[in-house]
Amino acid sequence: MVNPLFNFKILILGEPAVGKTSLVKRFVHATFTKDYLLTIGVEPYIKYAKVRKKQIAYTIFDVAGQKAFNPMRKMFYTGSKGTIIVFDLTRRETFDKVETWLTDVKKVSSDQHFILVGNKVDLKKQRKVKKSEANKLAKKLNFGVYIETSALTGTQVDQAFNKLGIELFDNETSKKKK
C-alpha cells in the first residue's frame, strides 16, 4: 500500500482537443491514443511519484473544455493545489483563451500554483504560436513555468507534471516548517 506524504489535487484545463487527456494518459499510463475522445465533465486519475525522495500522489482532474460543461466545471476547482493550463501550439485560438481559463479557475481557487503548457510541439510545420510569445504570456500572467510538450512522443510530459509537483511539495514543506 502506497502512503504518500502529500496528495495534490491537480487540474488540467484548456480548450477542447488541445491534448489534455492525452497528456494525462501519457503521464499516468505512459500511453498515447490517436483517437479523440470527448471528456464528459471530468475524469479523475491518480499517479504516485517521488519528489525530493518523498512519495507523493497526484490526483489529476481532467476537466472537459466544452462550453456545455461550464456550469458544472467550477465545482471541481475547489481544493485544487495546482493547475496546468494547456493550449495547442498549432491552433492560435486555444492560446488566445489561456487568460480566460486562468481567470475562471482563480475565481474559485486562487491560492495555488499554475503552469502553462504548449502541447503538440512535434507538429513543427503546423505551429502557430511562437515560444517567445508563450514565454511572454506566462511571465505576464505569473505562471510558475512554461513548457512545451508532445503527448504523442512523450516530450517533456513528465517534466511538466513533475515541475508542478516540485513547486507544490516545496510550498507544503515550507508551510510545515513555520
Image (cartoon, rainbow, N blue to C red):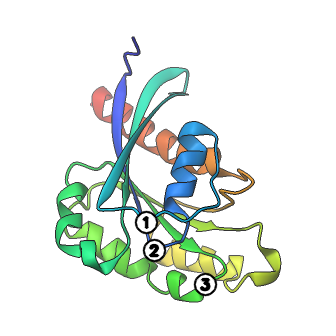
- The residue under label 3 is 91
Residue 126: assigned label? none
Q: How many angstroms separate mark 2 from mark 3 (CA)?
A: 11 Å
At 63% from the left and 46% from the top, the residue drawn is: 159
**Disc number for residue 38:** 1
Compared with 57, 69 (above or below) is: below
Q: Quadrant of the C terminus?
A: top left
Between disc 1 and disc 2, the foreground one is 1
The label nearer to you, 3 versus 1, is 1
Circle nearer the N terminus (3, 1): 1
Distance of label 3 from label 1 (alpha carbons): 18 Å
Amino acid type at image mark 3: Arg
In three-dimensional space, the C-alpha distance between marks 1 and 2, rounded to whole angstroms, equals 8 Å
Which residue extends farthest top? 1
Where disc 1 sits, the SS reads loop
Q: Is residue 69 above or below residue 34?
A: below
Q: Nearer the viewer, mark 2 or mark 3?
A: 2
Residue 88 position within the rendered picture, expressed as x and y whole percent measured from the top left: 59, 75
On the image, the x and y values in percent for residue 55 come to: 46, 22
Instruction: Give the residue type at disc 2.
Output: Pro
Q: SS of the residue at dot 3?
A: loop
Image coordinates of residue 108 in percent, x first then y, are 19, 64
First reached walking from the N terminus: tag 2 or tag 3: 2
| Sooner in the amino-acid sequence: mark 1 or mark 2 | 2
Give the residue at mark 2: 16
Three-letter residue code for mark 1: Leu
The structure residue drawn at horizontal position 31% and vertical position 56%, both measured from the top left corner, is 42
